Amino acid sequence: MEDIIRKQKQFKHPIARVWEAISVADQISTWFIQADFKAEVGYHYTFTHQGTKITGEVLIASPVHELVYTWMVSGTETVTTVRWILAEYENGTILTLEHSGISGYPATMAVTMFENFNNGWHSCVENLEKHLAGMN
């Protein structure tokens, strides 16, 4: 089973704007899910969506280039890792999102979680693009 979900997207927005969208709680809550979040190493965050809580700790917060945090879905004991990497290019920002450690879930659950996360991250990147374009 693959263990890393990777999404990459080019945005026609400055790197500082994309960083703000992925690292500031009010922004995250607009395009992703309700967030109690600070891009500060050691911060214990909570994301809440339809009764499901996701908790974790910020491991790396290197404005405007990298944000890494652990990810644990309530009701499970598996800790995975989410990594956002931003790079400037001449017309904007390239975002790379990686979610790893999913093979740590029990066997059959790992396959389901991988599919769910893969679909969810695809939607999130699309929602982020709409948010940055001012559609949200």
Image (cartoon, grey):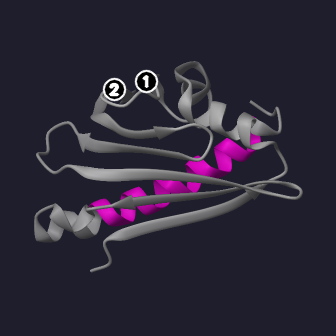
Give, as a three-letter code, the residue at label 2: Tyr
Q: Which residues are magenta?
A: 113-131
Which of the 4 image quadrants contains residue 4? bottom left
* Farthest right residue in view: 91
Q: Which mark is residue 37?
A: 1
Predominant secondary structure in magenta? helix
Classify mark 2: residues with Cα within 10 Å, few (<14), some (14-19) or many (20+): many
Question: Is residue 116 on the magenta stretch?
Answer: yes
* Farthest bottom residue in view: 1
Marks 2/1: CA distance?
Answer: 5 Å
Provide residue 126's location: percent of width, then percent of height.
Answer: 66, 51
Numbered disc 2: secondary structure: strand
Quadrant where the C terminus lies? top right
Question: Is residue 13 on the magenta stretch?
Answer: no
Which of the 4 image quadrants contains residue 21? top right
80, above or below 52, in the image? below
Q: Nearer the viewer, residue 42 or 54?
A: 42
Provide residue 85's location: percent of width, then percent of height.
Answer: 56, 54
Residue 115 vs residue 127: left or right? left
| Image marks 2 and 1: residues in contact by CB distance under 8 Å | yes
Q: Nearer the viewer, residue 107 or 3?
A: 3
The residue located at (11%, 46%) in the rendering is 77
Q: Name the N-terminal-most of marks 2 and 1.
A: 1
The residue located at (10%, 64%) in the rendering is 106
- Reading the image, the residue beneath label 2 is 45
Provide residue 83's location: percent of width, then percent of height.
Answer: 44, 52
Q: Which mark is residue 110?
A: none
Residue 80 vs residue 121: left or right? left
Q: Nearer the viewer, residue 91 or 119?
A: 91
Quadrant where the N terminus lies? bottom left
